């Protein structure tokens, strides 16, 4: 039985058993549905083997929404456990596992695919490209992300979840304190997903630098494309650090290499430095594309061009540079000395300056604008005061002396969520509503959307603002219980009520999709919002080739100019279009990575080696493959254009 014992859950509970049953039933249901409706061939041809950036973006989007609910379930369980003193809903071990998986799922497997979804869906259209620079690499990036996400999410039913926190600090993450395979899941799943993210960074940078339409200089790019470009530059520089750290952590656990142990020359603080050299730029990898979305939405619904275009661009560049110079503020309480603390306190506060520039630019854009209070605009307006509060509390945390009071309390938890939820989640939901008609052919219901917005906003305030008070009063984060004598009970109950309201809000999103799919008009045209940037200049639904003719760019809002100032956007005759072929290799490589990762987690060396060989075989096959793509004829393009409503 020793071989099989390693796959057992170290700390089983009724919730874990229920999850096992739910996963099994869901899997059976999916297989049965695909078989009954005879959709296996369609699934393979249209989705599993696709290299179309739009379909890959939709797969990222669906994955992110699923992970949002997965991570949200963890959040509700944590808030329920802390709602009352001395609660018994979760024991200490289960709570440790839940707050660990909540952080990893929300950052790595929800927020990252959300921003990659919008990058894939929007960037090629905004720059007038047919696809991304490396379509097959783009598909591989998604399937590696998906393999990592699925690997991480089976941990709580096979072998046990990681329990050392989402930062997985050593020595807590070492074999002495984390004996189960949970931390192995952490190391391998994030590694596989991170390789996919690094590929996306390289791909998007190349796409934006080399595939812009004629006339689109860097300073004529739409603001979302600028934000995506800067975020992907950060990815290219930051993710290799995480990759190296995860390799070292994995070898520590599997081969006793002692990079991060407290014996044999290891240094646990080395992990902390590596992690936050990646981890703090990661915050801006998430927030900068969100800023880009807000810029597009605020400009559209204020019916004004974005105020201070150049200052917006340079503020993002400055943020990206400073993001690599602040990581040590996570160590203010770790005894590193007054000089070091002072330097990183200054750099941390300095990053608020370019962020403040962007806040004022959005406000000036709305000033004297003809604002339409649509659902995307409500999220954008709501973001500004909430995010500003999060930023102010960040400046408080940046004061190293004061951080001795704030650090490791619920105050810090409140601050982090006060920036990420309005800054990223609100932006993703605003972008989801804004771009939904472009890629799905119908609009989400505005009334239901506004109900969702207010549920999430009120719920957010109730859930996280009380944490500032309990944190200042001494409630430590990561503690699974507290006594009634502390007096934390009423405010924690208020936080639970807020979290429940947010959960209801997320459920209304699902209902909105269902209701709108059943009832919304399909006759919405290609530009239902009267938007300003190039992605709205093509048809709805967007054809495979995006644009029948390459657009000619004259400004950063060239589509608006074509509508209002008579600029001719599409010139010349329709010509044959070259497009890449679909390929099943990225999907197959994703499966092989999953198998190899699972094998390494459980030290199953034979399948692990076979998996590695399979990965190199796939790479070699691609190297010798002669696939020059295919061509769409002029006749076929014209037929498609006529069907969609006229040549673009």
Image (cartoon, rainbow, N blue to C red):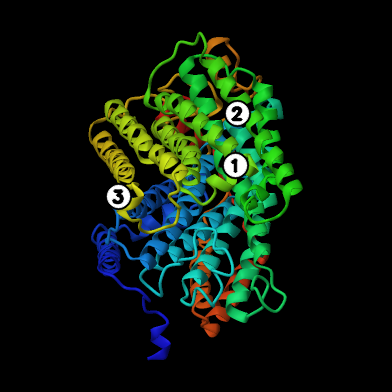
Query: Are the residues at dot 3 and dot 2 in contact (C-beta closer than 8 Å)?
Result: no
Please give the name of the residue rendered at 70% of the width and 26% of the height, measured from the top-left corner.
Answer: 219
Q: CA distance from mark 2 to mark 1?
A: 36 Å
| Chain-order first, disc 2 or disc 1 | 2
Residue 200, how many percent across, how many down? 60, 50
Residue position marked by numbered label 2 in the rendering = 223
Is there any visible trace of residue 210 in the rendered image? Answer: no
> Residue 25, relative to residue 364: is it above or below?
below
Q: Residues within 10 Å of mark 3 (few under 14, many from 20)?
A: many
Using a 10 Å C-alpha cutoff, classify the residue at mark 2 as few (fewer than 14 neighbours), some (14 to 19) or many (20 or more).
Answer: many
For disc 1, the marked residue is: 402
Closer-to-camera residue (416/122): 416
The answer to which image quadrant residue 471 occupies is: top left
Q: Relative to 294, does residue 115 appear above or below in the rendering?
A: below
Q: Secondary structure at mark 3?
A: loop
- Mark sitting earlier along the chain (3/2): 3
């Amino acid at each position: 039985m020793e071989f099989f014992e390693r796959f057992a859950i170290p700390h089983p509970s009724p919730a874990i058993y229920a999850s096992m049953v739910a996963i099994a039933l869901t899997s059976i249901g999916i297989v049965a549905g695909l078989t009954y409706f005879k959709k296996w061939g369609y699934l393979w041809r249209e989705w599993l083997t696709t290299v179309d950036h739009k379909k890959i973006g939709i797969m990222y989007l669906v994955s992110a929404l699923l992970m949002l609910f997965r991570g949200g379930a963890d959040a509700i369980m944590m808030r329920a456990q802390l709602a009352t003193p001395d609660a018994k809903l979760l024991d200490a071990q289960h709570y440790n596992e839940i707050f660990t998986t909540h952080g990893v799922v929300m950052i790595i497997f929800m927020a990252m695919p959300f921003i990659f979804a919008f990058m894939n869906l929007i960037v090629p259209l905004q720059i007038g490209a047919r696809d991304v620079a490396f379509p097959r690499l783009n598909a591989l990036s998604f399937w590696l992300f998906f393999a990592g996400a699925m690997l991480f999410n089976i941990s709580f039913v096979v072998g046990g979840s990681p329990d050392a926190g989402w930062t997985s600090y050593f020595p807590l993450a070492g074999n002495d304190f984390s004996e189960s395979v949970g931390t192995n899941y952490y190391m391998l799943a994030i590694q596989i997903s991170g390789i996919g993210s690094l590929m996306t960074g390289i791909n998007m940078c190349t796409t934006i630098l080399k595939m812009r339409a004629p006339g689109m200089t860097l300073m004529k790019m739409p603001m979302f494309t600028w934000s995506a470009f800067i975020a992907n530059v950060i990815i290219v520089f930051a993710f290799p650090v995480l990759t190296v750290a995860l390799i070292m952590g994995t070898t520590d656990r599997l081969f006793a290499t002692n990079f991060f142990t407290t014996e044999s020359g290891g240094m646990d603080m080395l992990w902390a430095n590596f992690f936050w050299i990646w981890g703090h730029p990661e915050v801006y990898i998430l927030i900068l594309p969100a800023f880009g979305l807000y810029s597009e939405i605020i400009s559209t619904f204020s019916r004004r061009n974005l105020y201070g275009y150049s200052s917006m661009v340079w503020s993002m560049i400055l943020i990206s540079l400073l993001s690599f110079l602040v990581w040590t503020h996570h160590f203010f309480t770790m005894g590193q000395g007054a000089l070091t603390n002072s330097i990183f306190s200054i750099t941390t506060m300095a990053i608020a300056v370019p962020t403040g520039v962007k806040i004022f630019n959005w406000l000036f854009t709305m000033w004297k604008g003809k604002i339409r209070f649509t659902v995307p605009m409500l999220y954008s307006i709501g973001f500004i005061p909430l995010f500003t509060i999060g930023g102010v509390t960040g400046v408080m945390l940046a004061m190293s002396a004061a951080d001795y009071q704030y650090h490791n309390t619920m105050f810090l938890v409140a601050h982090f969520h006060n920036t990420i939820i309005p800054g990223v989640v609100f932006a993703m939901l605003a972008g989801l509503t804004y771009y939904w008609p472009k890629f799905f052919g119908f609009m989400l219901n505005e009334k239901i959307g506004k109900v969702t917005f207010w549920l999430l906003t009120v719920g957010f305030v109730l859930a996280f603002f009380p944490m500032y008070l309990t944190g200042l009063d001494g409630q430590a984060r990561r503690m699974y219980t507290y006594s009634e004598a502390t007096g934390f009970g009423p405010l924690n109950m208020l936080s639970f009520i807020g979290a429940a309201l947010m959960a209801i809000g997320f459920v209304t999103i699902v209902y909105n999709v269902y209701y709108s799919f059943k009832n919304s008009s399909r006759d919405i045209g290609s530009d239902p919002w009267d938007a300003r940037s190039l992605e709205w200049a093509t048809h709805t639904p967007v054809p495979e080739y995006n644009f029948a003719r390459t657009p000619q760019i004259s400004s950063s809002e060239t589509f608006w100019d074509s509508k209002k100032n008579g600029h001719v956007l599409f010139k010349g005759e329709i010509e044959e279009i070259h497009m890449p072929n679909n390929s099943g290799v990225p999907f197959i490589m994703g499966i092989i990575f999953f198998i190899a990762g699972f094998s390494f987690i459980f030290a199953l060396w034979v399948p692990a080696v076979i998996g590695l060989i399979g990965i190199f075989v796939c790479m070699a096959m691609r190297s010798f493959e002669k696939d020059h793509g295919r061509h769409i004829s002029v006749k076929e393009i014209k037929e498609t254009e006529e069907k969609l409503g006229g040549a673009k």
